[in-house]
Image (tube, helix red, strand yellow):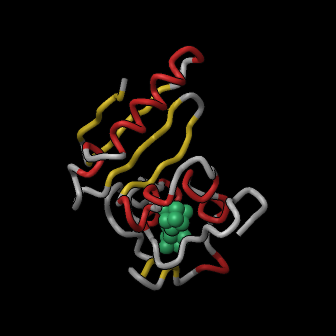
Amino acid sequence: MTAETVSGRSCGTCTLCCHLPEIDVLSKPANAMCSNCIEGKGCTIYPDRPSLCRDFHCLWTRDGRLGDEWNPARSHMMLYEQGPQTTVLVDPDFPEIWKQEPYLTQMRRWAAEGKAVGRYVIVFVGDQVTKIG
Ligand code: SF4
Ligand code: SF4
């Protein structure tokens, strides 16, 4: 936990960010569990994990405006921001969950609110990419 994260929010047994994103420095493809991770237990090289992993905190852990429904362990989605883009990586085992409520309405609202300043929301489910707006 760092000063950047929301008080009371921790990863617990969630390992979604060790599973969904492509991580070049680890030669890890998207949607494959990192070979250093034991699901439900976590990183086996935790003290020596790359700085990329060390510095990463998904949006739910960093932004208190996201309610607990966005807890990745519950939503099966992992969110982060890249410049003007809010990226939503969906666990392919739950490919339709982003279309369910309250998620879709909230993402549409973020897109509408951010449009004036060039912000947008992109949802990835495996190879399927959807821009919300
Ligand atoms: S996706 Fe978020 S809550 Fe889950 S392990 Fe990664 S940083 Fe923690
Ligand atoms: S090295 Fe550790 S923290 Fe980084 S993706 Fe792999 S299991 Fe997760």
Which residue is nearer to you in this view: 71 or 89?
71
Please give left or right for residue 115 compared with residue 99 in the image: right
User: Residue 34, percent across and down?
Assistant: 41, 70
Please give left or right for residue 34 compared with residue 82 in the image: left
Which residue is nearer to you in this view: 126 or 4?
4
Please give left or right for residue 72 compared with residue 80 in the image: left
| Screen quadrant of the N terminus | bottom right
- Residue positioned 38% across, 49% down in the render: 89
- Residue positioned 44% across, 78% down in the render: 37
Which of the 4 image quadrants contains residue 114?
Answer: top right
Q: Is residue 72 visible?
A: yes
Q: Is residue 26 visible?
A: no
State the count of labels.
0
Farthest-out residue, top: 116
- Residue positioned 59% across, 17% down in the render: 117
User: Residue 96, percent across and down?
Assistant: 21, 49
Farthest-out residue, right: 3
Which of the 4 image quadrants contains residue 94?
Answer: bottom left
Which residue is nearer to you in this view: 124 or 22?
124
Q: In the rendered view, would you say 70 is above or below 65? A: below
| Screen quadrant of the C terminus | top left
Q: In the rendered view, would you say 47 is above or below 25? A: below
User: Residue 22, percent across and down?
Assistant: 42, 53
Q: In the rendered view, would you say 87 is above or below 71? A: above
- Residue positioned 53% across, 46% down in the render: 80
User: Residue 38, percent across and down?
Assistant: 41, 82
Which residue is nearer to you in this view: 36 or 68?
68
